[in-house]
Amino acid sequence: MQTYRIISMTMGMMLSAGTAMACAPGEDLRATLGFADLTAAEQDGFARLFVPEQAVLTSENIAIDDAFGFARCDLGGMGDDTLITFALPGVFCEENCLLWALHRTEEDDWQIILAAEGAVTVAGSYSMGWPDLVAHGEGFADIVHKFDGASYHDELEGLIYGEVFDLPQATSWQADEFDFVGVVPGSPGPAGEAVIALEAVAQQLDISIDGLAAGLTDLNGDEIPEVIVQGEGAEFCAADGCRTWIVSITAPNATILADVTAQGTPEIAASTNGAYRDIIIWSNAGARVLRHDGNTYH
């Protein structure tokens, strides 16, 4: 089964209006439609993009709905539904099945803009105005897919972080009205949390706080900011990123929840594990998700 095909086609007919699923941050994309629920244009698009798969179904006398499920999702937030196509267990896969996102362009072409394995969760962070998507399943680490303006990618692929992926500008360390949580530098925190975190990391390393920078965020919604501490300069940074600490504060004490290497500022996802939000970090190997296990992040 072909998984990463970018195929476009000219559609003579306009896609009629349909109801998109919410695509809410923190929730998995799920099949909610059958083939008969699709518009004629969507059905034709599926038929043209999935020729090999349909040949198998025809030869085995298998209905499309026994092998595929569908949903609509306005990923771009512009009223243009993206058709999500799910491979269902049984015909082409048993577990960690594939999922594709088919998007209609301004030129009335359709193309596959995402191919992912396993379940896919909508993250709270964004790239080029489109939500990041986190693929997860049995037997493999979570994979973050980011939109580059044309399609989703699961690694940097030579692109420069920060020039391609545009996150909203956080003005507060607390969640905004859209439940977005950023990392805000330059503030000591309501009870000096940033200073406490900097001193805790410096004490652990037996260094001064010079060369360390802190940003406030909210990982668990308890009205007490957590702190992202990052090293700056050659002492802390190499080609794959800079040393980064996630610090929880219960004044006057600090607890280091993670000690990792990251390119750029970590991103706070809308998805959670227990009370704590997941964290997306980047390195030369691509993006990965840190999840809280009740005590620390892994």
Image (spheres, helix red, strand yellow):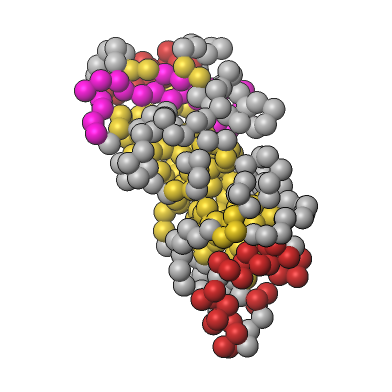
Q: Position of residue 171 (x, y in %)?
A: 58, 18
Give the answer, above or below, for where 86 lies relative to 178.
Answer: below
11 vs 130: above or below? below
Q: Nearer the viewer, residue 243 or 164?
A: 164
What span is in magenta? 214-239
Residue 77 pos. (x, y %): 66, 40
In which image quadrant can residue 91 be found? bottom right
- Quadrant where the C terminus is found in the figure: top left
Q: Residue furthest bottom?
A: 60
Q: Is residue 234 magenta?
A: yes
Q: Which residue occupies 68% across, 39% down?
A: 78
Q: Report the front residue among 27 and 45.
A: 45
Question: Residue 94, can we see it?
Answer: no
Q: Does residue 41 show up?
A: yes
Relative horizontal placement of residue 119, taking residue 286 as reference (left or right): right
Residue lying at the far left in this picture: please name it: 234
In the rendered image, which quarter is residue 16 located in?
A: bottom right
* Residue 286 locus on image (x, y percent): 37, 44
Q: Residue at x 54, y 82 (%)?
A: 56
Up-down relation of residue 211 to residue 244 (above or below): above
